[in-house]
Image (spheres, grey):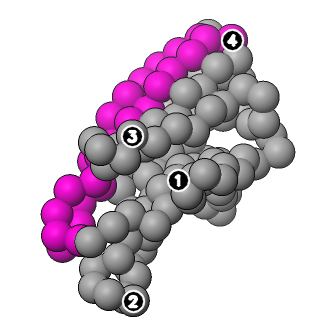
Amino acid sequence: QVQLVESGGGLVQPGGSLRLSCAASGRFFTINRMGWYRQAPGKQRELVAITSGDSTNYADSVKGRFTISRDKAKKTVYLQMNSLKPENTAVYYCNSEVAVWVGSYQVYWGQGTQVTVSS
């Protein structure tokens, strides 16, 4: 079983910054990719940012403001969020695809962390 534990959410004023962290633990061989999704009230869950190997991808709405990074030794992914806007308010979920066996991959989700951008 693989666990993804998120931290770093909270309340921030517009224009402020937050840094989310997600640490993976449990039994697996390697981590293929790690990323962040978010779900605002009444909306579908959407991709925010994802990293795999040396590549990263961002939702257009966060490019230039959010930065995803990964510490492979700590099995942790971070999301630095700057210039936050009220429309960034959502529950942010960590997502990871890991190799649980040779050639066998599974996707896991964290429990979610609330980010609220409000004055």
Specify whether 56 is left or right of 4: right
The residue depicted at 50 percent of the width and 45 percent of the height is 92
Q: Quadrant of the N terminus?
A: bottom left
Label 4 to label 3: alpha-carbon separation: 26 Å
Residue nearest the viewer, comparing 28 with 39: 28
Estimate how packed mark 2 is, as few (under 14), some (14 to 19) or many (20 or more) residues with alpha carbons within 10 Å.
few
Across and down, in percent, residue 45 comes to: 61, 60
Of marks 3 and 1, the one in the foreground: 3
Estimate how packed mark 1 is, as few (under 14), some (14 to 19) or many (20 or more) residues with alpha carbons within 10 Å.
many
Secondary-structure class at tag 2: loop
Of marks 2 and 4, the one in the foreground: 2
Query: Which residue bears the numbered disc 2?
Result: 103
Query: Which residue bears the numbered disc 1?
Result: 35
Q: What's under tag 3, amino acid-wise?
A: Asp
Label 2 to label 4: alpha-carbon separation: 44 Å
Based on the picture, tell me whether residue 3 belongs to the magenta stretch: yes
* Residue 54 seen: yes
Query: Which residue bears the numbered disc 4?
Result: 15
Based on the picture, tell me whether residue 119 belongs to the magenta stretch: no
Across and down, in percent, residue 76 comes to: 35, 44
Specify whether 41 is left or right of 65: left
First-in-chain label (4 vs 1):
4
Query: Which residue bears the numbered disc 3?
Result: 71
Label 4 to label 1: alpha-carbon separation: 23 Å
Q: What's under tag 1, amino acid-wise?
A: Gly
The answer to whether residue 18 is above or below residue 48 is: above
Secondary-structure class at tag 3: strand
Label 2 to label 3: alpha-carbon separation: 23 Å
First-in-chain label (2 vs 4):
4
- The dominant secondary structure in magenta is strand
What range is drawn magenta here? Answer: 1-28
First-in-chain label (2 vs 3):
3
